[in-house]
Structures are given as structure tokens and as C-alpha cells.
Amino acid sequence: MSNIDFTYLDVLSEDDDDFKTEFIETFEGTYVELVRKMKEELSNGDLDQLSKAAHQLKPSAKMISLPCADTLEDLQYHPDKASEKVLKEIEDQCDDALKQLKEWAK
């Protein structure tokens, strides 16, 4: 479990509950869809599309200081390094981050 650094989000949100809710909903929808897409593209062997999906997810991961942000950046440039295990680790970190985000928003 990686602890999220909420410093940046605290500054952005200015304790606005609507912002927090919107950020969490956007993060959840984004990572669920992009991890699904990366798994699908790995299965299809379309490494170009896998690279693009990793690139799209990277900013959200960086914003909340997830360790998988570095992995996503690596996959962006070297999608051949993708594996089911690597994608599962990304998904697990995002799942955990979502739980922490929901606690933060309370």
C-alpha cells in the first residue's frame, strides 16, 4: 500500500467538496478504463495503443504520487515491458489510491 501525498490536491481543492467528488469520480473512471485498455492491448499485441493508454494514465498517477507513475512512464516509451503482472500492480495501486481518496474526501 502506497500512501498518497495529498499536498497538491489539498491546494487544488481549497477544501471544496464538489472538487473532491469530481476529482475522485474522474480518477476512478479514468484508471478503470485505461487499465482495462492496457490489458486488452497487451492481449491483442497492440503495443502502440498500450503506450498511449499508459501515457494518458500517467498524469493522474503523478498528481497523487503513486509509485506506478514511473512504471507508466516506462511503459509509455517501452510498452514491450508490459506484462499481466505489471498491469495488475498498476491496477492494485490505483484501487488502493481510490480508497484513500474517498477517505480524504470525507
Image: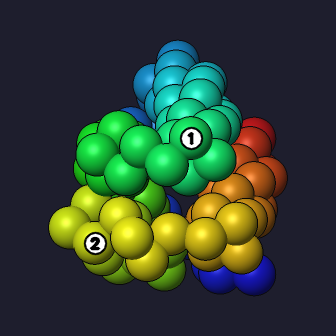
Give whichever of 2, 13 is nearer the camera.
2
Q: Residue furthest front?
A: 45
Residue at the (63%, 63%) spot, across then down: 87
Q: Which element type, helix, strand or loop, lies under badge 1?
A: helix
The image quadrant that residue 76 belongs to is bottom left
Q: Residue at x 43, y 77 (%)?
A: 81
Q: For residue 59, which numbered disc appears in the image?
A: none
Disc 1: which residue: 44
Asked if the residues shown at circle 1 and circle 2 are in contact, with their CB atoms under 8 angstroms apart, the answer is: no
Is residue 20 something that shows in the picture? Answer: no
**89 to the left or right of 20:** right
Mark 1 residue type: Asn
- Residue name at image x 75 percent, y 81 percent: 1
Residue type (three-letter) at the residue carrying disc 2: His
Is 72 above or below relative to 31? below
Residue 102 drawn at (x, y percent): 74, 44
Q: Horizontally, is 52 left or right of 39 in the view?
A: left
The residues tagged by marks 1 and 2 sit, at their Cα atoms, a distance apart of 16 Å
At which x and y percent is residue 28?
63, 34
Residue position marked by numbered label 2 in the rendering: 78
Q: Quadrant of the C terminus?
A: top right
Q: Which callout, 1 or 2, points at the residue further toward the start of the chain?
A: 1
Q: Is residue 30 visible?
A: yes
Identify which residue, 37 or 101, lies in the foreground: 37
